[in-house]
Image: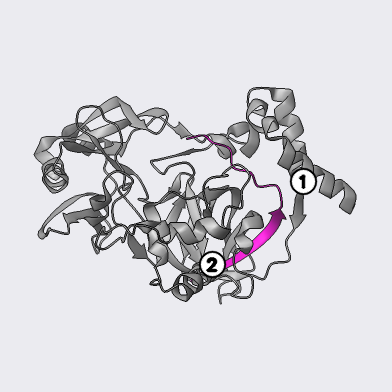
Amino acid sequence: MPPLLYALLLLLLAIAPWLLLPSLRNSQAASNLLRLLHLTKQSSTQKPSEIIALRVYPIKSCRGFEITHSKLCMTGLDLDRRWMIVDAETHTFLTIRQISDMTRILTGISEDGESLLLSTAEAKDKQLAIPAHPTEDWLAQNTTLVSDVKIWDTVTDGYVYNASVGVNQLFSAFLKRDVVLVYKGPTPRILKGNGDPKLLGRVQSTNFPDVHPVLIASQASIDELNSRLMWDGNEAITIERFRPNIIIRGDKETPWSEDWWKTVKISAPASASGQKMEASVTFDIVARCGRCQVPNVDPVTADKHRTQPWDTLMKYRRVDEGLKYKPCFGMLGAPRAEGEVKVGMKFEVLEETMAHRYIKGF
C-alpha cells in the first residue's frame, strides 16, 4: 500500500470514531469498515517468540493457577472462567473490583484432571471438590438452571449450585455475604464490541471473561513496567496481577510490540517421526486490553496498593483511542479453531495493524 494512502487510512480511523459503533448497526457501513481494517493489515517482521507460561482462572476474579498445557476451546482455555460467583438474590456477578478478597478464594485441579479443587485462604484444610467437566446428569442433580445471570450489560444463563454441594456456604462465609456459584449455561454468550460478528467475520462466544476468550501478555512488557516501578522506588509485581492466559517471552529490545498484533499463530515443531505438518492454532487479535485497578491488588494477600501500578501505567500506556482514560496491558484474542497449547510452543505474529481501536461491548 502506498505510504500516503496508509497514513490517510490511519488518520481516518483516528478522527472518525463514529464510524465504529454505527457500523455494527448498518451492514453497508460494516462492510466498508471491514475493508478498511483489512487494508491496514501488514505482514509482520516481529521475531518469533515462545510460550513460557499458561494460566487459567476457573472462577472469575478468584485465584487461578499455572498449567503446562491445555485444550484450547473456541470459548477460551479449558476451565477458564467457566464459573462465576454471583449475588445470591440478584444473580449479579461479583469481582475483585468490589471485593478484593475474592483473590483469596483458591482453585486447583486434581492429579487426574477430573475435579476442580476449591478452598479459601482462611480455611485451606476445608477443600471441596466439584467436577471439572460436569455432565448433564450431574448438573441436573446438583444445580438449578436460571436465565437471569448478569455480567456487565449482558444477561445470560447459568447453573446455580445447590446448597447440597456445600460450595455456596464456603464462599458466603468467607466473603461475609450471601453468594452462589454459577456454571455457564448452554446459551452462547456471543462476543460483542471488537468481537461483534460483523467485525470478527464469524459468530463466536465465550464463558465469563469480561469481553473476549483469551488474554495474551508478554514477559518483556511486564519486565519493562517493573523497571519503571523499581526506578521510582516501588516493588516489582508479577504478571499474575493482570490475569493473562498465555504468557510469551517477548523481545526485551522491543517491549509492547504486542500493541500492533493482528493475527498470531501458536505452533509446535514437527515430531521426530518425520511428520511434516505443524500442530498449530491461529488467533485473531481483536483488541488491546484496557485495565482497571485490579492489578493494584496483590493476588496473594488481597491488599490493594493505593497508586501502583495504575499511576505508572497511566503515564505511558494510554495508547488506545477507544480507551482514553484507561491504560493497556495485554491483547485480547479469539481463536479460529480448537487445538492444544503447551508451554514451549512457538509464537509467531503473522500480521500487524496500526488500526486497533477498542469498541465498548460486553
Q: Which residue lies at the image location 83% right of the left edge and 44% below the top edge?
A: 8
Earlier in the chain: of badge 2 and badge 1, it is 1
Q: Quadrant of residue 181?
A: top left
> Dot 1: within a 10 Å radius of its alpha carbon, few (fewer than 14), some, or many (20 or more) residues?
some
Q: Residue at x 30, y 60 (%)?
A: 299
Q: Is residue 350 magenta?
A: yes
- Left or right position of 117 against 46: left
Magenta range: 344-362
* Residue named by callout 1: 10
- x, y percentage for residue 272? 56, 77
Q: Residue at x 34, y 53 (%)?
A: 57
Q: Callout 1, which amino acid?
A: Leu
**For the point 27% across and 26% down, which residue is it?**
146
Compared with residue 280, is residue 32 higher up or lower down, i.e. above or below?
above
Badge 2: residue crowd in 10 Å (few <14, some 14–19, many ≥20): many
Q: What residue does disc 2 label?
A: 221
- Look at label 2 and name its amino acid: Ser
Residue 109 sits in quarter: bottom left
Badge 2 element: helix
* Res. 312 mark: none
Circle 1 — which element? helix
Nearest the viewer among 155 and 160 is 155
Q: Does residue 184 belong to the magenta stretch? A: no
The span from disc 2 to disc 1 (Cα, nearest Å) is: 25 Å
User: Residue 41: x and y, percent?
Assistant: 75, 50
